[in-house]
Image (spheres, coloured by chain):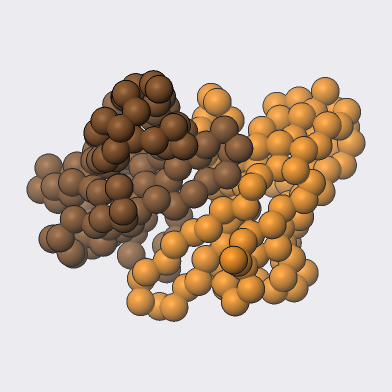
Amino acid sequence: DARVTQTPRDKVTEMGQEVTMRCQPILGHNTVFWYRQTMMQGLELLAYFRNRAPLDDSGMPKDRFSAEMPDATLATLKIQPSEPRDSAVYFCASGLSTGTGKHEQYFGPGTRLTVT
Amino acid sequence: AQTVTQSQPEMSVQEAETVTLSCTYDTSESDYYLFWYKQPPSRQMILVIRQEAYKQQNATENRFSVNFQKAAKSFSLKISDSQLGDAAMYFCAYRSPGFNYQLIWGAGTKLIIKP
């Protein structure tokens, strides 16, 4: 049963600290998405990649957030320095783009980040 | 720009009964995809059902079915024989065709199952 995995599941950190969240997409998937979920804003797309190349990161605060795909099996989302307003659940999702237009996103369990 | 609206913040249903969750969307595109995702308390986002706009037939997955009304831009989810495990937040989402992979999300509906 292929699944997207994310680590850590929960993270509590102090303001100003660096936070790195990791995601392992489903093997064979060529698109990866990072979302942030808060009560106030709902689900927001932060960035997405296709074939490891960033296609859109316009939803991400550039001054403190960065997203990368060092290889096809790992995507990372980094916040440096973290702030209390970054507290949220961060989801990674992956999908397979075949050019037919059909493209479903499968989500990981999320990382709950709390910045104090 | 496309928008998705879920007008019911919360719904409740008796176990074994049927419930319908509403979703409307706004778009000028003729071809697109619509999804319902479920998020239980475990917070895992689970794909429930998908509908392609060019298909007139409503999608069905076991106890879950949709009523897709393209002209009315409506995409409701019907859950039959509700079970306690169906209790969750339900999100409706829209996606354009082609290589624009961004999902446009509704605000969600919290479904409560009464035993």
Of B81 and B57, nearer the camera is: B81
**Residue at position x 77%, y 69% from top?**
A70
Give the mark count. 0
Q: Quadrant of residue B89?
A: top left
Position of residue A49 relative to residue A72, above or below, is above
Residue A70 visible in rendering: yes
Instruction: Compare residues B115 and B1 and report the one nearer the observer.
Output: B115
Q: Residue at x 40, y 78 (%)?
A: A99
Q: Position of residue B62 (x, y in %)?
A: 31, 53
Q: Nearer the viewer, residue B75 or A50?
A: B75
- Residue A78 image position (x, y, % from top left): 78, 49
The x, y position of residue A95, in whole percent, is 52, 66
Question: Does residue A43 appear left or right of residue A85 in this picture?
Answer: left
**A40 relative position to A19: left or right:** left
Report x, y in % for residue A86: 71, 32
Q: Is residue B66 above or below residue B42?
A: below
Q: Which quarter of the picture shows residue B57?
A: bottom left
Q: Is residue A112 left or right of residue A101?
A: right
Relative to the observer, which residue lies in front, B106 or B22? B22
Whether B43 is drawn above or below B50: the answer is: above
Q: In this rendering, would A20 be left or right of B24?
A: right
Tell me, what hue is chain A? orange
Placement of the N terminus of chain A among the 4 image quadrants? bottom right
Which quadrant of the structure image shows residue B4? top left
Quarter of the image with the C terminus of chain A in it: top right
Residue at 53% from the left image edge and 46% from the top image edge? B45
Q: Is residue B30 visible?
A: no
Colour representing chain B: brown
Q: Residue visible at 26% across and 30% down?
A: B17
